[in-house]
Image (cartoon, helix red, strand yellow):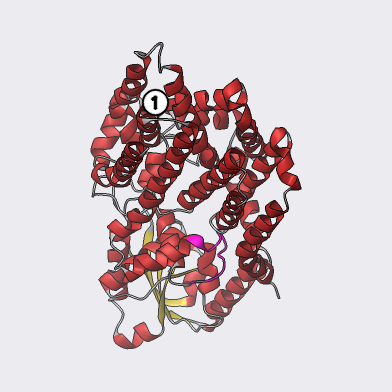
Amino acid sequence: MRKYNTWLYIFALLKLIIPFFLQNSYYQPHRDEFLYLAEGNHMAWGFMEVPPFLSIFAWLTHLFGDGIFWIKFWPSLFGALTYIIAGRIILSLGGKIFALALCFLSFIYSGYLRVHFLFQPNFPEIFFWTMIAWGAIRYVQTQKNGWLYVMGVSAGLGMMSKYSALFFIVSVLAGILLTNQRKIFTNRHLYFAAAAGFIIFLPNVIWQYHKHFPVFHHMQELKETQLQYISPVSFIIDQFVMFLPVVFVWIAGFIYAAFSPAGKTYRFVALAYVFVIAILLVLHGKSYYSLGVYPTLLAFGSYFLEKRTEVRLKFLRYVYIIVPLIFTWQFVPIALPVLPPQQLARLYEKTSAKKTGALHWEDLKDHPLPQDFADMLGWEEMAQKAAAAWNLLDSNEKKRAIIFCDNYGQAGAVTFYAKKYHIPAAYSDNASFLYWMPDSMHIENLVLLTDDQEEMQHPFIKDFVSAQLRDSVTSAYARERGSLIILLKGANDAFNQMFKEKIAKDRAVFVKP
């Protein structure tokens, strides 16, 4: 067992460090990463988009100097920890080195390669989903009540990471209820564990109440702008595409838990998977929302394939290892931006990456780069040009000036680079930035960042003494390419009244009177 533990931690270390060697240094933080990093400057029990768990690591990132290493360290760390839990599931079943190795490859040659390198709430959510499953599996194996508390605490922390953890919690409980493991519901420790999880989550519930439950407004907006365009067919297809080089592993894991006599004890895991997929289909969830359910299936599948080839068909082990490796040059450049944008775009053309759907954006069109990669470009250029516009103001004008951005990506990027370019943090009425706007402010001068190409034709421009289009984002392949930097000076009272009313109207939707 000690030998297997050693291999488990070697593979976990590789999982931690490999992405740092793959991603090209040309790329900057992702649009969403800037938002979540900004939340670390405004610690609270919740935010408009997510619960507070991720902001702890944003705060630590700021404490350690905001280096790109620390931004990427936390998702990489949680990715390694998730693999360790999956490995523990394998070892608890009696698995050995081959199963650990196959599971490791499944974490590298899958959507986890990207998810575990982006500073977004998905990485802690996936970890806590896996911990919930691990707690349930170990309780079934040992009948020790302590594992119920692992489930409960993990459920609470999962809900503090991302609200969609509720889908998995409900699915696991429903799966248990429909199998022979249902006797767990007669154990009072299950309810004590549930109470512990609820206490962990309670501060966010209270915060939601005082903020008029912004999670519902955010979900409605997400549904109207993005989720309604997701078809059930594309969602199902993506479940296979996300794991294309190793899809046979999670399928084997599902077969093991759902149909094999040896996996009968774990039928609830297979049922939980079915319920999660069904819930996401009904709600038009994005494909990656389901990623938290797969580490357990990958662990089961790795063990099952190892067991099936232990005596007979041993040559298949070479096939199971070689198949993912064959996909290296096709899969890895889609999972992470391993080359500068122009080279990557040319590679996609040669490999017909468009056919995989990897170049399909939320606007339902195909582009030269995946949307996530385009969202990693142009931000520092934007901050530099905003700083150049800001520095056209004299010292007195700066005292009565702000930098205002149309969207959270722009505001987050300017705020992130503010110290480097000696400018103030940006304001915005988009996403959680709306909460951080001052209750009242008198604006005379404004550096405006906008992706609206018609901004200079809007009526409010006439409320300023002068309006200059100073620059725009020109970074090739950037999603923000074309965003404008406008310098506005000498605002009148009409603008200030309009601006005040606009912010109040935006807040009224989310803030409880």
What secondary structure characterizes most of the magenta part? Answer: loop
Nearer to us in this view, 276 or 353: 276
Q: Residue furthest bottom?
A: 396
Name which quarter of the figure residue 342 lies in: top left
Q: Decide if residue 406 is in sight here.
A: no
- Tell me what residue is drawn at x 62 percent, y 54 percent: 152
Which residue does the numbered mark 1 point to in the structure image? Answer: 245
The residue under the point 52% across, 44% down is 130
**Vertical side of 496 occupied by 299: above or below:** above
- Amino acid type, callout 1: Pro
Q: Position of residue 36 (x, y in %)?
A: 45, 61
Image location (x, y in percent) of residue 64: 30, 68
The one nearer the camera, 164 or 432, is 164
Report the span colored magenta: 43-53
Q: Is residue 44 magenta?
A: yes
Residue neighbourhood size for the residue with mark 1, other residues' Cα within 10 Å, grouped as few (<14), some (14–19), many (≥20): many
Q: Is residue 353 left or right of residue 247?
A: left
- Please state if 181 lies on the left or on the right of 422 as rendered: right
Give the residue drawn at x 34%, y 71%. 63
* Furthest residue toward right: 186
In the rendered image, which quarter is residue 327 located in?
Answer: top left
Position of residue 109 relative to residue 128, above or below, is above
> Would residue 190 be counted in the magenta stretch?
no
Q: How far across and down, in percent of the image, does residue 326 sit?
A: 30, 22
180 with respect to 13 (left or right): right
Q: Quadrant of residue 82?
A: top left
Q: Is residue 182 visible?
A: yes
Q: Position of residue 54 (x, y in %)?
A: 47, 60
For label 1, the SS is helix
Q: Quadrant of the N terminus?
A: top left
Image quadrant holding the C terminus, namely bottom right
